[in-house]
Image: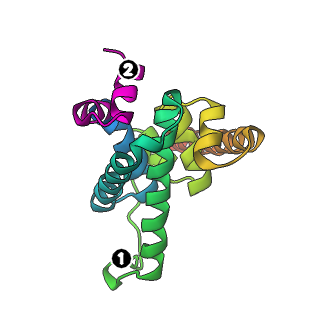
Amino acid sequence: MDSPDLIRQAIHGDREAFIRLIRDIENSLYNTAISMLRKEEDAADAIQETILKAYKSMHTLREPQYFKTWLFRILINECNTLLSRRSLSTSYAEVPAGHQTQSSPYDEVDIREVVNQLEENKRIVIVLHYFEDMSLRQIADTIGLSESAVKMRLNRARKELYQQFMKFREVKLHVKPI
């Protein structure tokens, strides 16, 4: 059974159809949540709340083709809620130590790590566009911006990623082995 049929069934209250839809998209939900929140526990909380809210309000989804966009919008709102709560109560254990350890220039570049270093507004457009294969229109609908604003953020994020990779390459080329 294809996704539009499952979505229609879920809209009409079919619990099993909803579960199948969530299972099909759970890795994407996790990747988006972890890229925003950077903590396993918070990502799990955001996903759980997203699924619960989506299930309770599934009947309000008017256009089945926007299910993924609708679900990601709920997830992003949940992540933002958790982030705002977190900023209000930063525990002592979360305060960074006085020094950071430097990674070796020989370490492989992990694209997700570099993306996670971007500011949140740039990171989310990269994650949704490249990791979740959302179109610019879907991203715009999901995060509540115009398509041109999404294009601009995506362009800025690409430039920043390019600069980060060039720095990595430069460091790797100039470091002589011992």
Nearest to N terminus: mark 2 or mark 1: 2
Viewer-closest of 160 and 7: 7
Type of colouring? rainbow
Query: How far apart are labels 2 and 1 at the CA level?
Result: 45 Å
Q: Which residues are magenta?
A: 1-21
Quarter of the rendering occupied by the N terminus: top left
Magenta residues, dominant SS class: helix
Question: In screen coordinates, is 159 left or right of 66?
Answer: right
Residue 94: assigned label? 1
Residue found at x 33% / y 55%: 43
- Determine whether the residue tagged by mark 1 lies in a helix, strand or loop: helix
Residue 162, horizontal then vertical, whole percent: 63, 38
Q: Quadrant of the C terminus?
A: top left
The answer to whether residue 178 of the structure is visible from this angle is no
Q: Identify whether 49 is placed above or below 24.
A: below
Which circle marks residue 5 in the picture?
2
| Residue at the left extreme of this rendering | 16
Image height check: is 44 above or below 90?
above
Looking at the rendered structure, the kind of residue marked 1 is Glu
Residue furthest bottom in the image:
92
User: Badge 1 local density, few (<14 within 10 Å), some, or many (20+)?
Assistant: few
Disc 2, SS: helix
Closest to the camera, between mark 2 and mark 1, is: 2
Residue lying at the far right of the rendered structure: 148
The amino acid type, in three-letter code, at marker 2 is Asp
The foreground one among 118 and 163 is: 118
| Residue drawn 51% across the image and 27% down it | 65
Position of 100 with respect to 127 (left or right) is left
Spot occupied by residue 97 in the image (x, y as percentages of width and height) = 38, 78
